[in-house]
Amino acid sequence: MSISIRVDGVELSGRDGQTIAGVLLGNGQRTWRDAHDGRRGIFCGIGVCQDCVLTVNGVEGVRACQRTAVDGDVIEREGRA
Amino acid sequence: MNRVVVIGAGPAGLAAAASAATAGADVVLVDEGERVGGQFWRHHPDLTDPRLQHQLGRFGRLRESLSTVRMVSSASVWRVEVDPLRVHVLVGPADATGRAAETLTADSVVVATGAHDRVLPVPGWTLPGVTSAGAIQALAKRDALAPGESTVVAGAGPFLLPVAQSVALQGGRVAEVVEAVGFGAILRGWGTKAWQLTAAAGKAGELSGYVASLARHRTPYRFGSAVTRIHGTDAVEAVTVQRIDTQWRPIAGTERTVECDSVGLGHGFTPRLETAIQFGCAISPDRFVTVDAEQRTTVPGVFAAGEITGIGGADAALAEGEIAGLAAAGAASDDPRLKGAAAVRRRMHAFAARLEVHGIRAGWTAWLDDDTIICRCESVRRNVIDEYVATSSRGMRLATRAGLGACQGRTCGRSVDDITGAAGSTVGAGFEHRPVLSSVRIGELAGLSNGAGTLDTEPSGGN
C-alpha cells in the first residue's frame, strides 16, 4: 500500500510503514534543512544525532528518521542557520 | 513478586525480560521503538528483506516468551531515580506533543540501552549523503532503501561487512569498502588463540557469507586506508581515499578520488550510558558500565546488560541479558539456570576481545582541517576547539558550544575528547556526563508539573 505526504507543498508518495526520512530518500530528496554551514540531511538514522529534524503537521523538531509517515502528513523544512 | 523494569528491547533487553518473566517476576519492558528488536532486529513486517536479519529464530522465540510481559513501545525514558527505583516515560509518536506520561516503580531495573555508531569527523562529513554506517542498516531494514546509487562504506571493524551487504541487497552499488586497519594487522589480531574462534563458529559462517556477497558484487575492499575528505557542493559527489599508518595518520601522496553519491562512516560503537549515569552506576575507565558476574551495577537493584557493558555483539548481549534478568528476578548466584548463559558470555567476550585490533588510534585527528566541523549541532569547527583546549571540559563547552546542541554531545563528545587529549580523563567530568536522557518538549514538562503526570515537586538533587 502506498501513502502520500506533502513536503513544502509537493506531494511525495511512499510505502506504508516507511519513516518520513524513508519517504524523502525514496523520492531522491536528501537535503532537507539548512544549518550554519550549509544543507543537512539524515545522518545517524536511529534518533541520536537530531540532524534530520523537520516540522510535521505544525510541530517543529520532529526527527524524520523516527516518525512513521502517515498518509496526509504536511511537512515543512527547517532552517537553523 | 519482584517487579522488574527493563529499559531497551534489543537482544539484551529482550533476553532479560524473557528470563525475568520465566523466573516469575512481574516484568515491564520499555523501548523507544515502535516494535521490539532494537537496532539488531530492527524491522518492519512488510518492508524488511529477511536476508538482512540474523538469528530470526531466536528473535521469534524471545517474542513468544514475552506473553506475560507488559510492553511499553514508543516510550521515551526521560528520567530515572533510585531509592525508590523509578522510571519516568513519555509514550507516543516520536517527538509528538502531549505524549502520555507514566512512572514505573520497580524492585529492580535492567538497563539495556545499547550503543550507537562512533563516527570520526572528516572534512565534508556534514554534506547530505554522508550517514553513519548504522544509518545504512537502519534504512535498509526499516525503510527498504539503499542510501543512494553508489556508496563508499568506510571506517573500522567487521560491522562494515553487513553494511556493504545491505546496500547491495537493496539494489545499491558499493563503490568501495575502506577499512582503517591493515590486512596483516587484522590477520594477526584475529588469528591469535584460534581455538577460541571455534567457540564462535556461527560468526565464521556469517563472515563467509559477507565475503561471498562482496565477491559476487566485485566490491573492492581496501585495508589500511581511510576516507580523509568528502567532496561536494550541496551533497556528496566524491571522496578522497588515502592510506593511513598504524596510528591512523594519513600518508601523503597516496590520495585517490572515488566518485560516489553516498558515504557510510562507522568507526566502532559508543555505549548509550545516559540512563546508567543518571542512576549513578560506576563507569569504568574505558567508558562502560561496571558490572559483576550477575550483571549487577554498583547501584543496588540496578543491572546492566549488552553493549553498555562492553561492545560484544548480539550473542554476548543475549547471554548478559539472560543473566541480568534472572538475577533481577531474584535468582541466587548459584542458580543452575545461570550456567549456560555464563558459558556463552565467556566465549563471546573472548571473541569480542579481537575487536580491539580495529580500535580508534589517536592519529586520526591529522586528517582534520582547521575549519572542519566537529560538533554538527552547533557547527563548531576544529580551530575553535583548539583555542580552548587548555580549559576545563565545562569551560570549553560554554565557550564553544560544542556538545550543547540538540544531540547533547552524543555525536561529537568523544571526538572533542580526542582532540583535547581528555580521552583518558575522569569519567563523568566531561562529555560523558550528560543526564539528558531524551528530548522532552517544554510544554510536556509544564503539563507534568500541572498534575497531568507525575513529575516530583521536590528537587531531585541527584542529577
Image (cartoon, helix red, strand yellow):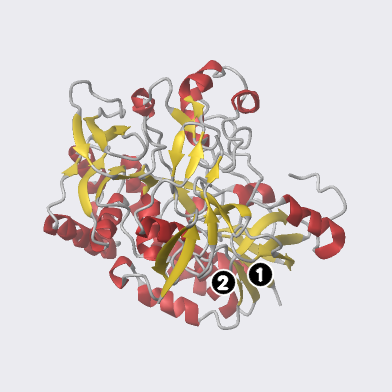
Considering the numbered disc 2 on the image, is that residue within a helix, a strand or a loop?
A: helix
Which numbered tag is attached to residue B17?
A: 2
Instruction: Tell me if residue B334 can be seen.
Output: no
Q: Chain of mark 1?
A: B
Q: Amino acid at mark 1?
A: Val
Query: CB of mark 2 within 8 Å of CB of mark 1?
Result: yes
Asked if residue B272 is positioned above or below residue B363 in the image, the reply reads: below
Q: Nearer the viewer, residue A5 or B332?
A: A5
Specify the quadrant that holds the N terminus of chain B. bottom right
In the rendered view, does B329 fall on the left or right side of B235? Answer: right
Within 10 angstroms of label 1, few (less than 14), some, or many (20 or more) residues?
many
Earlier sequence position, callout 2 versus callout 1: 1
Residue in the picture at 39% in, 45% down: B268
Give residue B246's position: percent from left, percent from top: 27, 29
Give residue B47's position: percent from left, percent from top: 37, 71
Residue marked by disc 1: B4
Residue in the picture at 52% in, 22% down: B385
Residue in the picture at 38% in, 56% down: A25
Asked if residue A24 is positioned above or below residue B252 in the image, the reply reads: below
Give residue B287's position: percent from left, percent from top: 52, 41
Q: Amino acid at mark 2?
A: Ala
In the rendered view, does A15 fall on the left or right side of B433? Answer: left
Which numbered tag is attached to residue B191?
A: none
Residue in the picture at 59% in, 60% down: B94
- Which quadrant of the figure has residue B452? bottom right
Considering the numbered disc 1 on the image, is that residue within a helix, a strand or a loop?
A: strand
Asked if residue B384 is positioned above or below residue B104 in the image, the reply reads: above
How far apart marks 2 and 1 lie (CA) works out to 8 Å
Within 10 angstroms of label 2, few (less than 14), some, or many (20 or more) residues?
many
